[in-house]
Image (tube, helix red, strand yellow):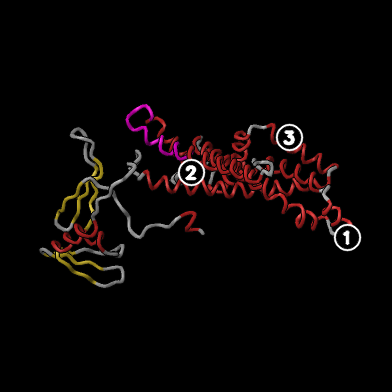
């Protein structure tokens, strides 16, 4: 699970270069060059460092056209410089193409879009799960018992609704801090009111049904009536509100990341990608901000349409 969420470090370090040249047993890589008036940024590597795992304190010895070193397992190795140069050219240098281009830091935009989708889906699933847990619990208690529990839950719903959602999420992130899980919790804690309101209304209607009265007559506990007879009949409305909340959670996470309150760099997020490149909209590189923005729009629209379709499917009055 940790690798699924956080990924893993690659076995080798990839360095983007503009061009390379060999200086005997060294490889000189040109990392950055903007023109004739700028000084090219270069970095030098030893040939064995590129091809093999070397001990950190290994001593290199050049003898004519050959070089010797100590490998990571302690074994002494020797090879010709020309042979190592051929291995570097054939196996360690590759040309990569970026279908969507790169951002201002030279990072592949397509790869960051894919990883940003992971963040959007994760915040949707976890935030909706938190909102369902709180909404089902409070809504079922308020609708089933009425009286002071109902008045208390309704008062709490009105208090939460009186505060703008984004402002409340920002306040929660200030308390919990900025981070991966803090965003999930903050978004989930602000979305339970819609679930609680729908569940309360449905439970108020279902508790008057004959099968609920019969369950009370035979002495079934309130817990058993709620979780065995009432909540299973709420599947339709709960699924519909969950699809709607999923779209809202994605949009809210993108807004937080755009404001700099969401997940922190270097974790990619569609909202943070728009924030980093919205200044390019007025120039010829507007795609850097438009691509993640369009992705947010399409994903939110998809879940909104899915919620509308589920609503029509569960609506018994629809012909």
Q: Is residue 259 magenta?
A: no
Looking at this view, name the residue that lies furthest to the left: 64
Front residue (pair 250, 178): 250
Q: Which residue is mark 1?
A: 218
Q: Which part of the image, by quadrant, shows the C terminus?
A: top right
Report the side of 217 relative to 36 (left or right).
Answer: right
Q: Is residue 179 above or below residue 278?
A: below
Work out which residue is located at the far bottom of the displayed protein and give it: 75
| Foreground of the two, 86 or 151 | 151
Q: Position of residue 76 (x, y in %)?
A: 23, 71
Q: CA distance from mark 3 to mark 1?
A: 37 Å
From this view, report whether residue 245 is shown above or below residue 2. Answer: above
Q: Identify the residue at horizontal 46%, vertical 45% (top origin).
A: 116
Residue tagged by mark 3? Answer: 158
At a point 35% along the width and 60% down the height, the residue shown is: 11
Furthest residue toward top: 282
């Amino acid at each position: 699970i940790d690798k699924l969420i956080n990924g893993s470090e690659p076995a080798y370090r990839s360095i983007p270069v503009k061009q390379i040249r060999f200086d005997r047993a060294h490889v000189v890589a040109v990392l950055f060059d903007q023109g004739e008036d700028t000084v090219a940024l270069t970095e030098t590597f030893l040939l064995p460092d590129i091809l093999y795992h070397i001990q950190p304190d290994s001593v290199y010895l050049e003898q004519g056209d050959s070089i010797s070193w100590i490998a990571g397992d302690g074994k002494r190795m020797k090879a010709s410089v020309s042979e190592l140069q051929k291995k570097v050219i054939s196996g360690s240098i590759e040309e990569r193409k970026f279908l969507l281009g790169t951002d201002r830091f030279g990072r592949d935009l397509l790869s960051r879009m894919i990883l940003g989708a992971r963040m959007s889906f994760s915040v949707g699933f976890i935030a909706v799960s938190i909102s369902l847990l709180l909404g089902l619990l409070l809504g079922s208690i308020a609708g089933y018992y009425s009286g002071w529990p109902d008045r208390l839950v309704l008062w709490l719903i009105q208090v939460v609704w009186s505060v703008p959602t984004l402002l409340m999420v920002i306040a929660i992130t200030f308390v919990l801090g900025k981070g991966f899980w803090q965003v999930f919790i903050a978004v989930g804690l602000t979305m339970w009111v819609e679930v609680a309101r729908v569940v309360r209304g449905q439970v108020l209607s279902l508790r008057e049904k004959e099968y609920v009265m019969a369950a009370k007559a035979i002495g079934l506990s309130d817990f058993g009536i709620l979780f065995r007879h009432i909540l299973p009949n709420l599947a339709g409305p709960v699924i519909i509100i969950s699809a709607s909340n999923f779209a809202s959670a994605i949009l809210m996470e993108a807004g937080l990341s755009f404001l700099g309150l969401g997940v922190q760099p270097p974790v990619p997020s569609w909202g943070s990608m728009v924030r980093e490149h919205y200044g390019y909209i007025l120039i010829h590189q507007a795609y850097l901000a438009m691509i993640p923005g369009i992705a947010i729009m399409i994903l939110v629209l998809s879940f909104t349409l899915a919620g509308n379709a589920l609503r029509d499917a569960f609506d018994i009055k629809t012909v």
